[in-house]
Amino acid sequence: MAFGGFAYGISVVFALKGNASTGGTDFIALFVSNKIGKSIWEHVFVFNTIILIIFGAMFGWLYAGYSILFQFISTKTISTFHHRYERVTLQITTQKDEEIIEEYIKEYRHGISCIDAVGGYSKKKMKLLHTVVSSYEVNEIVSLMKKIDPKIIINVLKTETFFGGFYRKPIE
């Protein structure tokens, strides 16, 4: 049962990463999450548990208990591995700011800020770039920037709260 819950949870994560759904309560969770910009898997678990408690009272607690345990493990797996709504801040230090900004804006629909800086060790003029992106995009963006500037320094910071316009790619 524990393995089944985990396997189901991982399969839902793969479906969600591929912009698909299993057609169950994850469909509702995706719809609501897209509207509010946050993951609601804990709420889905509570809703499913209430339904299982009702069925447990009607048909017996043994299978309801197993089903609640299955729901807990699968929902915990999904919330652990599905990070579509998490945002991160990239702080980028580079001397090739113009090329990086140009390519970044071609590929992504997020804003990017540029600040003059001086290297503390090298004393060379450089730029500090700042942008907020989805955690799903980080690896692609880092690869893009490293192609342009192999000496680039990128600091990835978890963003707890973000106010302002943020482009979220729609689920197709």
Image (cartoon, grey):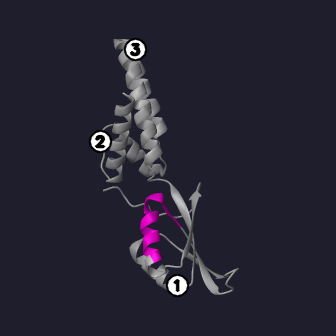
Q: Quadrant of the N terminus?
A: top left
Instruction: Report x, y in % for residue 2.
Output: 39, 30
Q: Main secondary structure of the magenta part?
A: helix
Q: Secondary structure at mark 3?
A: helix
Q: Position of residue 58 (x, y in %)?
A: 36, 13
The answer to if 13 sits in the magenta stretch is no
Left or right: residue 140 versus residue 90 is left
Instruction: Depth check: give the residue in front, 131 or 165.
Output: 131
Between 22 and 82, which is closer to the camera in this rendering?
82
User: Residue 9, relative to residue 105: is it above or below?
Assistant: above
Magenta region: 132-146
Q: Quadrant of the C terminus?
A: bottom left
Which amino acid type is shown beneath numbered disc 2?
A: Thr
Q: Is residue 88 left or right of residue 17?
A: right
Label 3 or label 2, whichever comes before in sequence order:
2
| Residue 22 marker | 2
Within-10-Å neighbours for mark 3: few <14, some 14–19, many 20+: some
User: Which secondary structure lies at badge 1?
Assistant: loop
- Looking at the image, which residue is at 49% across and 49% down? 38
Image spot of residue 107 (x, y percent): 39, 73
| Residue shown at 40% from the left, 42% from the top | 29
